[in-house]
């Protein structure tokens, strides 16, 4: 789901977010409000608000005139998205909407950012699957360009497996599965986006000797619109456009997967190994 945020510098309490939301509403209606009036509305002392808003000024969330900076606006919008997405997950688990929204706020305040992001992903996927379920077909297949029609625009950590080209069954995992860091990173954009994998050094036994082979992926090719293309590789990271990936949604099992055939070469220590093709399967 969305990538885990590393910084928690702006992790305020639920009540502090309420202070900011009330301030924004007043600014939109009447300009700068008096702290005493805001304190009466929030049932807190004006001095408490003054200290908190002063902290927000020092963190570049508010200006000295208590106007929201661009960073402050983004902070409130992000908090609203978190609360909405976690609330959706809770509702899908059987909680009523009012209670779910309240509990979502409690989760954001009490849990780590890593936990919050995991729960957000569940909410986002529920929303995506609801959209996919609205179709009449039990199995839907679509090009990665259309992924943003169902999945929220954003960055996601994605589980994946490389299978041998002809037999995607248990026990038939390709050696290429060891050649990349897990999970991968997917950037979903409107009618666009890419999957990014990080190549690793791998060591495996050679079939013809007792020695082992050590190397790293050198090239990767994929097909897009029936044209064979070279994937972009930079700093050991390879990018595959979502338009090269076919996604399939199975309504009965509520599963969304992506698949793409990739042809790769590995730069082994002494020589270039021959090309091999594997099927990359994404689990969303």
Image (cartoon, rainbow, N blue to C red):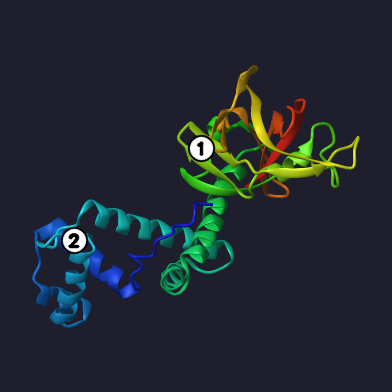
Neighbourhood count class around disc 2 (C-alpha, 10 Å): few under 14, some 14–19, many 20 upward: many
Q: Which residue is mark 2?
A: 62
Q: Between residue 272 and residue 198, name the one nearer to us.
A: 272
Helix, strand or loop at disc 2?
loop
Residue 110 position (above or below residue 189): below
Would you say residue 127 is visible in this rendering?
A: yes
Q: Position of residue 269 (x, y in %)?
A: 72, 35
Which label sits in the foreground, 1 or 2? 2
Which is more N-terminal, label 2 or label 1? 2
Neighbourhood count class around disc 1 (C-alpha, 10 Å): few under 14, some 14–19, many 20 upward: some
Would you say residue 262 is visible in this rendering?
A: no
Helix, strand or loop at disc 1?
helix
Q: Between residue 171 and residue 264, name the one nearer to us.
A: 264
Q: Position of residue 152 (x, y in %)?
A: 48, 45
Q: Which residue is depicted at the point 15% across and 73% down?
A: 38
In-image side of 217 versus 172 (left or right): left
Q: Position of residue 82 (x, y in %)?
A: 42, 59
**Can you tell which mark lies on residue 229?**
none
Residue 213 position (above or below residue 117): above
In-image side of 122 versus 202 (left or right): left
**Can you tell which mark lies on residue 149?**
1
Number of numbered discs visible in the structure rendering: 2
Question: Residue 221 falls in which quadrant of the image?
Answer: top right
Q: Position of residue 31 (x, y in %)?
A: 9, 59
Q: Between residue 192 and residue 239, name the one nearer to us.
A: 239
Q: Which residue is depicted at the point 53% across and 48% down?
A: 156
């Amino acid at each position: 789901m969305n990538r885990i945020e590393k910084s928690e510098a702006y992790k305020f309490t639920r009540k502090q977010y309420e202070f900011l939301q009330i301030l924004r509403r007043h600014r939109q209606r009447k300009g700068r409000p008096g702290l005493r009036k805001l304190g009466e509305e929030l049932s807190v002392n004006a001095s408490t608000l003054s200290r908190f808003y002063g902290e927000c000024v020092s963190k570049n969330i508010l200006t000295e005139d208590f106007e929201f900076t661009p960073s402050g606006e983004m902070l409130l919008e992000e908090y609203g998205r978190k609360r909405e997405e976690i609330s959706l997950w809770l509702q899908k688990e059987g909680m009523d909407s009012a209670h779910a929204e309240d509990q979502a706020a409690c989760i954001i305040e009490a849990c780590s950012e890593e936990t919050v992001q995991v729960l957000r992903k569940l909410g986002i996927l529920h929303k995506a699957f609801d959209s996919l379920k609205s179709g009449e077909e039990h199995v839907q297949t679509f090009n990665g360009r259309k992924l943003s029609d169902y999945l929220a625009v954003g960055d996601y950590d994605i589980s994946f497996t490389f299978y041998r080209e002809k037999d995607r069954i248990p026990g038939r995992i390709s050696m290429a599965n060891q050649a990349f860091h897990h999970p991968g990173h997917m950037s979903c954009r409107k009618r666009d986006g890419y999957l990014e994998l990080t190549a690793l050094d791998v060591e495996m036994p050679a079939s013809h000797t007792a020695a082992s082979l050590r190397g790293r992926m050198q090239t990767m090719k994929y097909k897009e619109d029936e044209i064979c293309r070279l994937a972009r590789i930079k700093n050991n990271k390879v990018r595959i456009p979502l338009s090269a990936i076919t996604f399939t949604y199975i309504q009965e099992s509520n599963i969304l997967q992506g698949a793409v055939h990739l042809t790769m070469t590995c730069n082994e220590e002494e020589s270039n190994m021959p090309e091999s093709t594997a099927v990359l399967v994404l689990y969303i």
